[in-house]
Image: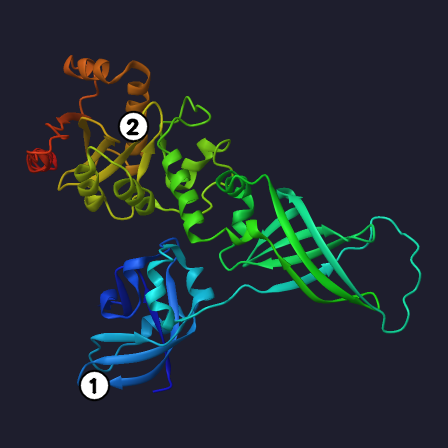
Amino acid sequence: MGKTVVIQITNDQVLLSPGINLPIAHTNIPVAHLRFSSHNPIYWEVEQLSFDAAAGELRVRVVDYESRKVNLFKQQAPKKAIYRLLFEKFDWLALQRQLTSFQKSMLQDYMDNLETHPFSYQISKIVPPKKITPVAPPTAASRQKVVFAQSLKWPAVQLKMGYAECRVDHPHREQEVVVRVNNDFLLPEFETIKAWFAKKLQRKRVDVVGSWEEVDGQIENLRVKSEVIGLIGPDLIESIRYQRSYALTKAPSRFLPDKSLFTTDDIFDAFEDSLEGGNVFGQEDADILQFLLEKSEVRNKKQLAFLASQQLAGEKLRYSLHPNFGFLFVLEGENCRHFIWELLNSHATYLWSIEKTAGSITAQWQRVEAVINSIRTQGREAYKQSYRAEVATDDLIFNHLPHEKSGSDFVDHFPRWRHRLLEHLV
């Protein structure tokens, strides 16, 4: 006991070392009400406090939420079987930075196991005056209380790590004072989406009120608050994340005639006008797909979930944006690679099969993109007719799998679709 070890945290499990894992449900992390980011691996260094050998229960305390001791993680191994992992109080400020979402109301029951960080107010610095105005020198130990209330435009507010930096005018001098309004939910990357906060809050300006004391020209006892900054919390941030994710399913703001497929890394570039700030939430393939399956009423939800579970490891998902939003998966059979195009709320699955030996997988992606580009130009029916007329390339085998009565509330035809699909995955 007292020794530190490194563990890896995911949304499903805690890895005690490579190949040795513990279901996250066997910990006291409230996983039902939060979700960890999958953008980068999360490693925690924890101190071992006590171990109940009979129950296999290890109690630990996190000492570093961003550990870089990956080599230690790879070399270590538990000496005894561990069935439960209990954490001492979490540092909420450090923990929430590793989350993509959480339910604030549901976490109230877990507050005893969270160290909270209440709002506080600090002064950052005084900006040199714009103009030099003669001021009578203060008398020794002179003290003056200054009260201010100002309405700032959003550009005068800079969002930082855990606070908003606001430039307010000095009520009695021609100079600005930079003050800090703390809010644990703010991140520097949110600076690029301030317009979304303004739109969601329906506030074109940010109110800032407060007071301080000036003692011999020095500011002390600063007190400042902002109702608007205080309204930025997890629920608001999650609603913006929802709207930005949903916006991806609409027509892009600019049309790229020679590009039909996008990865998660570049999908936001096509929406640069409407989604300024790009992939600000660090979303990955699984995040976007899971959002659409959980948050939206999707006709072919089961088909999308099944294809995602079969996606070829190491290959990124591709998206089609125009004229319809959809996903292009790649599955691998014994002899062929299978590229499967599933449009959101579509009535059919498009399947292209290419032998593994027919060029590199990069070249095969490009071939399928060229086909989808032609479909985008001539239409799906025209493409199917041309393929039946044997106009299509011989070694690019195409199959069309309808979703039979996918909207029916009485008959589930998904098993039949899955059976037909698996027949083609040779």
Q: Please, what secondary structure does the residue beneath circle 2 have? A: helix
Nearest the eye: 369 or 117: 117
394 left or right of 9 in image: left
Question: Picture quarter containing residue 6?
Answer: bottom left
Tell me the kind of residue under disc 1: Ala
Does 426 appear above or below 131? Answer: above
Residue 97, percent from left and from top:
45, 59
Mark 2 neighbour class, 10 Å CA radius: few under 14, some 14 to 19, many 20 or more: some
- Closer to the camera: disc 1 or disc 2? 1
In the picture of the structure, the residue carrying the numbered disc 1 is 53
Q: CA distance from mark 1 to mark 2?
A: 58 Å
Mark 1 neighbour class, 10 Å CA radius: few under 14, some 14 to 19, many 20 or more: few
Dot 1 and dot 2 residues touching (CB under 8 Å)? no
Residue drawn 17% across and 85% down? 54
In the picture of the structure, the residue carrying the numbered disc 2 is 367
Residue 17 visible in the picture: no
